[in-house]
Amino acid sequence: MPNDKNRINDENRTKCICRPCPTYNECMRAGDELLFCVTGKSLTCTFDKKVCLCPNCPIKPILNLTKAYYCIRGSELEQKNSGSLSGR
């Protein structure tokens, strides 16, 4: 159901820890980009890879996430489909 999915994403956005992440930058802030683990990597922003907070994200157990650096490497699904083990 689209409304349930939107509600869940809205709830997860409030728990999202992307904003304080050292890799998160002004470009991402300007676009209010969050939930890279669901939406995929930033398509418009370039940035330097710094520290990743994904492993400590409170959304990780809720969505059964196993990867990291979603803003750079893509969503959990994209990383799993690519066969990449580098996100662990």
Image (spheres, rainbow, N blue to C red):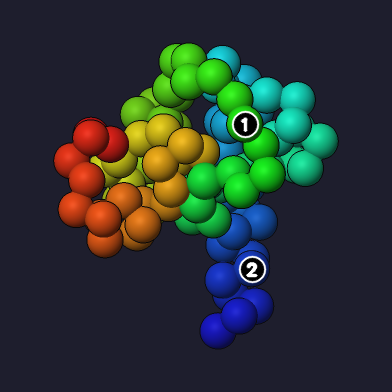
* Element marked by disc 2: helix
Residue occupying the point 65% across, 78% down: 3
Q: Which residue lies under the disc numbered 2?
A: 6
38 up-or-down from 13: above or below: below
At x 66%, y 37%, the residue is 45
Identify which residue is drawn at 39% across, 26% down.
56
Percent coordinates x, y for residue 74 in the rendering: 43, 48
Residue 55 % position (x, y): 35, 29
Q: Which residue is nearer to you in this view: 23 or 55?
A: 23
Residue at x 45%, y 15% (from the top left corner):
51
The image shows residue 15 at horizontal and vertical percentages of: 58, 39
Q: Secondary structure at mark 1?
A: loop
Q: Amino acid at mark 1?
A: Thr
Position of the C terminus by quadrant: top left
Residue at which label 1 appears: 46
CA gap between label 1 and label 2 equals 27 Å
